[in-house]
Every structure is written in C-alpha cells, then in structure tokens.
Amino acid sequence: MSEIIKNQKLGLVITFVVSFLVILEYYFPVGILVSSVAEVKVWSVVIAYFMLFIGAAVTCINHLKTVNRRTKDDWPYSVYSLLIIFIMIVLGIGLSPESTYYKWIINNMYGSSLMGVLCLTAFYVFASAFRLLTIRTWESLILVLASFLIMMKNVPIGEVIWSGFPIISDWMTNTIQRGAYTGLIMTIGMGSMIMGILTIIGRQRRRE
Amino acid sequence: MSLKMLKDQRLIYWILMILVIYITINPIGLPISITPSTREVYDIIESLPPGSVVLSCSDVELGTIPELMPGYVAMLKHCFRRDLKIVHYSFSSEAAVVTPMIFDALKDDLKDKKYGDDYTIFGFIAGMEIGVASLATDVQATFGADIYGTPVYNIPLMENLKTAADFDLVITAVPASYYRFLMRHWGAAYGMPVLVLPVAQVVPEAMSFVKSGDLAGVLNSIRGSAEYELLLKSPGDAIKALDIQSVSHLYLILLVVLCNVGYYISKRSEKT
Amino acid sequence: MIDFGNLVYIFMVFSCMSFALLRESKFSRIGETTMVSCTIGNFVVMSYLGLRGIVLRYISKGNYLIIFPLLIGTLVFIRLSGSLMKKYKAISMWGTNLLIGVGMGLTIRGVIETEIVNQLSSLILPLYGVSLTEAIQNIFVVASALLVIFYFLFTFYLKEEKGIIGSTRQLGRYCIIVVIGVLYGRTIMTRVSYLIGTFGDIIGMFK
C-alpha cells in the first residue's frame, strides 16, 4: 500500500482523473458531477493558498542561510528582508490588513518601491527603442511604421498633428493586426490545448 | 559637463523624467475624441435596468493604478449612477490596499447607497482561473465572508446570488490576459456580457475577442478611460495623464528619428 | 504637508530609480529588497486571510470535507526537508497534481470554444452584400490570419526559406511583425503610466 502511495504514477492518475471530470462536467452538467467538480475547484483554491505559503517559506529559508553564512555584502539585506516579512505578517495577521500600521507599510514602503522598480521599465523601454527601431531591413521598417502609427492613434497629439493618423491606424488595426492577432490566438490556443492533453496523459516531462 | 555626457544612456532617462514632471505641473489640455469602442462600453452599462447585479472583478495592482484605476472608477461611478448593484472582489493580492482606494474615489456616489443592499466588497480570491471558475459555479462557497468578516449568507445582496447566471454583467480591470478566465467561465459558459479594461498591451488581443463575440466591450486603457470620463462628464486623472503620454510619445519618436539619422550618417561615413 | 511617510515614499522611489539614473549601489539595493520582501509579506497575509475565510465558511455549514485539501496542502511542506523529500517526493506532489489537473481541465474546455471555434467563426466574413472597401478589408483580415497560422504550422518542417512556402511564410512573418510593432507602441503607454503615477503622487505631496 505504501509503495502505491509513494509511486509517482499515482500523481499522474490524480491529474488525469481530476481534469477528465472537469472537462466532462462542462459538456454533461449532471447534478452529482457539477457539485463534485465545484467542490474540487474550492479545494484547488485552498491548495493554491498553500503554494503561496511554500514560496514564502523557501525565500525565508534562503535568507536565513545567507545570514548564517554571513555572505559578504548580502547578509545585511537578508536581515532587512526577514525583518520586513516578519513585521508584515505580525501586523497583517495579528492586527488586520485594514490597520493603520499595515496600510502605512503598504503605501509608503511597498507601493513606493514597486512603483520605483516599474519606473525602471519605463526608462529601459525608451533605451531599447534605439536598438529595436533602427531601420536596417524591410522588417524593421514595418516594425517602426506599425509602432509609430499606433502611438499616434493612442495619444491626442496624433490627431492634432494630422487628422489622417487615426484613419490609417484604424485601417491597420482593423485589417492586418486584427487578422494576425486572430491567427496568433488560434495557434496559441491549439498549442495550449495540446500541451494540456500531453500533461493530462502524462507525456509532458515535468521538471521537479 | 563634457560632450561625453551626451553619449551616456542615462541622459535619456533624466530628460524623460524632467519632461514628465514638467507636464504634470503644467498640463497642456489637448482635445480628446471619443472612439466607438468606448461608446460601446458606455452604452452597455447605460442599457442595464436599475437593480441589475454587476460583478466587479478588479485585478488592479499597485503598479497599474495610474493606468487602470481612473477608468475602473469611472465605470463603477456609471454603475452607481444607474442604480446597479455591485458585488466587488479582486484576484490581486494587493486588494487590501487597492480596493479602499477605489471605493474612496467613489465616496460621493456612495453617499445614498447602503452597504450590503446596494453594494458589497469581498477580498482577494486566490487561484486565478480556478478561483474564477469556482466563483461561477458556487458564488457563496468561494466568497466565504466579506472584507469586514460578515459571512456571505448574512449579506442581503448575496441572498439570491448562487451562480454566475444570477448576475447581469461583469466588469473587470486587468494588467495582463487574466480577463480570459472571466471570458471562458462566465462569458462563454453562462452567456454573461464581460466588459474589460486592460492595460494598453493587452487591448489588441482583447479586441479580437470582441470581434468574435466572446467579450462585450473593451476600453482602450488610459485613452479609453479618459474618453469614458468625458462621456460621464466627470473629468479625472485619465484626462490629465494623456497630455503626459502625448509628450513622452513625441519624445520617443524624436529619439528614434535621431537614432536612425545617426545610423545612416555613420553608415555613409564608413563607406567613404 | 510632508510627513514621515511621504519622506519614506520619496526615499524608496528614488532608491529604486537610482539603479537607472545613477548606477547600482547599496542605495538601489535597499529599494529592491524592500519591494521583494513586502511582496512576500503581503502574499502571506492575504493568503492566510483568504484560507481562513473559506475554512470558517465550510465549518460553519458543518461540512468537514475541507480537511482533505488542508491535508494535501500541508503535504507540500515536505519539500522543505531534503531527507523527507527523498522518501515522500510523490506525496508532496499531490497538491501540485490536483492543481494541474483542474487548471488543465479548465484551460482545455475554455480554449476550444473561445480561442479556436469563436475565433474561427469571426474569420467568416462577407465578400458579397457589403461595400467594396469592407470586402477588401475582410480579405486582408482573413489573409493575414491564414498567413500567421501557416507560418506557425510550417515552422518545424522547413529548413530554408524558398519557393512558394518560403514566400508565404515570409508574408506571415511580416504580419507578425505588425503585431509586434503595435505591441511595442502600446507598451510605451503602459510604462509611461508608471512614471505619471509615481511623479503625480510625489508632486501631489508638495501641493
């Protein structure tokens, strides 16, 4: 019995049975099937919460190892990280996320640092324009024209400079872009479906 | 200061930052025209009879507040003005901070509304697609309790809401393709109209789903939000943001032109 | 009026931005570390409260089936111990297997209708009974969709771009490049929004 439980193939059986039931429920919404799949979905939400916990646990363990080893230049930041995580958990769970102190940390430390990091992406996108939007080939010309037209359509100054920009841009959006996107969505959809089927029948190699 | 500074990439970042700060302090006030996609979204909410129940599903994160919040607040404002009932939840873990910001911006419209009867706020539901699918089949079990800890069965508005079929409309703001979960499990499965406010990158993809009939309407990110504010006659942050967008886009185009001119000049001098 | 919270806000923003505006330094690392640790702390708090809500709801209804996912979720923590992992690796994967099963099932059933069938039906566009402009537009839409599908379907079978198939794939590539160009143009809008929001907040503090 313990050999059966420890066998990795049991996991594949769980995946197959659960996904088969979920797909079957969509096409045959019979009473007991609907209620059991609804139950399984709530179970998945609960397990998803545990996945978040394990991610946090692994990060904390890595930081503790860094502090233990006193890795040069890194260990003070690990102490700082662990302190912030601990304070947030104590305030959020001990008091409440609605408490003044928790909100203070979220607004003034989390929100600000997050926006700072995201502003970096704004800077790098402008720097990347140099490399991406240099016209060296026909393909780069198409790329530059497409981005230029959509930029002029999205901002009010495009219409102010020339009223033809939105018209040409709309034509490009409603013909080539629309068709190409439909093709992309269908191809990606087919790919996800095949990937899903391979995973369910156990033919997709997983990195564990 | 030397000429070597001009070759430094950091100069681009500093000029961009200065431009954004300058236009934020001195807005230009460029005219904004209304596009058909925004008009469609407006008309869908306008056509709902008072008392209809709307699922408001926000995935607005702290990072996407500037882009998504103005338009999302405008849509909710419209819903409240039309006396629609709102059931709000989030599948972003930053719901505890963002949700109060959203409802704080709506405080004037909430003065004559009663919590629990006209609107109710739930917190964060994990599991992304699984959470959305679970909500569609069993609303009460998935929600559990609202942000104040009131069990869902004690909330008058939630009494008759058991599955997705009991709602009339879904509105959502998303920073990526997460609207697909609502589209598949609420739209396609229950025939629910789904209105989406995505970030700019996701708009073309979402528009394909409008053409195929899977989505009812899409707001074009910050541009659509500004247009929606104009339609509601309630100007806000989106209209101010478009001025800065215009100037930064022009700056980028100038950089690209300079880069290409520089490239061709250097290519020519290599040949000679 | 500027208070201590606002000062911390400004410090954190410029700490992160100094990575690009100046260079990587201890100053920039403080901002990055704060962001990562606050994200983790927030995730843990939100997950705990969500989990507690669901469990209390089940128990108040007298439904104790919720014990099963709690047990399966707890088994995931076997991963934290190397020695336990060697013996009980398969058991620690049950939670993942359940999640993958539900996720894949939901994806497959949802994708077929929305991303394949409905998208295909949206390509069935009229050529007769519409204006000439609309008919030409519809031809462009269908042609670009077919060219993109052709490009992806024939990726594995061709080594060189030649002949009719090669030229068709080249046209498909051009259509994809239009999409990439549009995406890039739209990305600028999203990224600039971050700057607008950040500086809008900071300037608002001084007003």
Image (spheres, coloured by chain):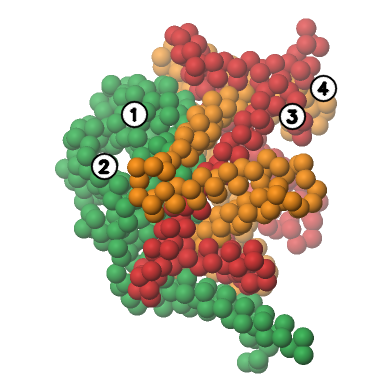
Chain colours: A red, B green, C orange
Secondary structure of the residue carrying numbered label 4: helix
Vertical comparison of B176 with C116: above or below: below
First of labels 2, 1 by sequence position: 2
Query: Do the CB atoms of the residues marked 1 and 4 lie less than 8 Å apart?
Result: no
Q: What residue type is labelled 3?
A: Gln
Q: What residue type is labelled 2?
A: Ile
Q: Can residue A139 be seen in this view?
A: yes
Q: Which amino acid does label 1 sit on?
A: Thr
Vertical comparison of C59 with B264: above or below: above
Residue neighbourhood size for the residue with mark 1, other residues' Cα within 10 Å, grouped as few (<14), some (14–19), many (≥20):
some
Mark 2 and mark 1 on one chain: yes
The residue that disc 2 covers is B45
Image quadrant for the N terminus of chain A? top right
Give the Cα distance between marks 1 and 4: 44 Å
Query: Do the CB atoms of the residues marked 3 and 2 lie less than 8 Å apart?
Result: no
The picture places residue B214, in percent across and down from the top left corner, at 42, 36
The picture places residue B249, in percent across and down from the top left corner, at 47, 71
